[in-house]
Image: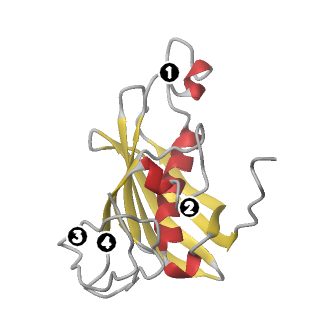
């Protein structure tokens, strides 16, 4: 369980991942790009992920974050099951996870890393582009999709993020996405 990150500082070396608990208030997460000491959060549950990104079932495509360094990198998983709504029509008798949803799942992993950066608290990450995306392996029910997002650079307010998705340690999809962080104009969903 992740708890309040208010007192987290640069104490964790990249090679030594520390288990930080409760992500409900990540106001003082320290992001130290290009330094050897960074804060890394491990083992975020689905419920904790929903406190960071606005996606909800059936469009929340990340079940767990294994490791995240705010504003830099994240690794997450999606347990692909036959109960996914998209398998009803894609394709009956031969269920294959749509490539566009694999890209969305990778983007959600990137969103967790980007929105955990203190300057992005309460904001929203949006696609600005998809480039060099290649699909190399079909993703089917029973697969565990392991996704990684690495922030490469920002230019004119748009992040370039390298993303990959693997099944059984084999690349299923990889490429780059562009992400822009905007203010979240959330409306009351109970209306």
**Residue at disc 2, secondary structure:** strand
Where does label 1 land, which residue?
Answer: 95
Which is nearer the N-term, disc 4 or disc 3?
Answer: 3
Above or below, comparing residue 79 to residue 14 in the picture: above
Q: Marks 4 and 3, Cα distance to the nearest angstrom?
A: 6 Å
Of residues 136 and 152, the one drawn nearer to the viewer in this rendering: 152
Q: Marks 3 and 2, Cα distance to the nearest angstrom?
A: 28 Å
Where does label 2 land, which residue?
Answer: 177
Q: Marks 1 and 2, Cα distance to the nearest angstrom?
A: 26 Å
Above or below, comparing residue 179 to residue 50 in the picture: below
Marks 4/3 in contact by CB < 8 Å: the verdict is yes
Mark 1, Cα crowd under 10 Å, few <14 / some 14-19 / many 20+, is some
**Residue at disc 4, secondary structure:** loop
**Residue at disc 3, secondary structure:** loop
Q: Position of residue 162 (x, y in %)?
A: 46, 63
Residue at (41%, 79%) from the top-left corner? 29
Q: Residue furthest right?
A: 191
Where does label 4 land, which residue?
Answer: 40
Which is nearer the N-term, disc 3 or disc 2?
Answer: 3
Mark 3, Cα crowd under 10 Å, few <14 / some 14-19 / many 20+, is some
Where does label 3 land, which residue?
Answer: 18
Q: Marks 3 and 1, Cα distance to the nearest angstrom?
A: 38 Å
Residue at (24%, 75%) from the top-left corner? 14
Mark 4, Cα crowd under 10 Å, few <14 / some 14-19 / many 20+, is many
Which is nearer the N-term, disc 2 or disc 4?
Answer: 4
Horizontally, residue 19 falls left or right of residue 78, namely left
Quadrant location of the N terminus in the rendered image: bottom left
Marks 3/1 in contact by CB < 8 Å: the verdict is no
């Amino acid at each position: 369980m992740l708890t309040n990150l208010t007192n987290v500082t640069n104490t964790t070396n990249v090679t030594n991942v520390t288990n930080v608990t409760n992500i409900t208030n990540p106001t003082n997460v320290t992001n130290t790009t290009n330094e050897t000491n960074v804060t890394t959060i491990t083992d975020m549950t689905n419920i904790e992920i929903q406190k960071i990104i606005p996606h909800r079932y059936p469009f929340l495509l990340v079940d767990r974050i294994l490791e995240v360094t705010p504003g830099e990198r994240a690794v997450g998983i999606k347990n692909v099951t036959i109960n996914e709504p998209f398998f009803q029509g894609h394709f009956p008798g031969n269920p294959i996870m749509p490539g566009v949803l694999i890209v969305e799942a990778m983007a959600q992993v990137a969103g967790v890393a980007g929105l955990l950066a203190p300057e992005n608290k309460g904001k929203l990450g949006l696609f600005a582009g998809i480039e060099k995306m290649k699909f190399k392996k079909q993703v089917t029910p029973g697969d565990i999709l392991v996704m990684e997002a690495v922030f490469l650079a920002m230019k004119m307010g748009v992040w370039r993020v390298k993303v990959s998705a693997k099944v059984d340690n084999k690349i299923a999809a990889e490429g780059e996405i562009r992400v822009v962080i905007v203010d979240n104009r959330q409306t009351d969903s109970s209306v």
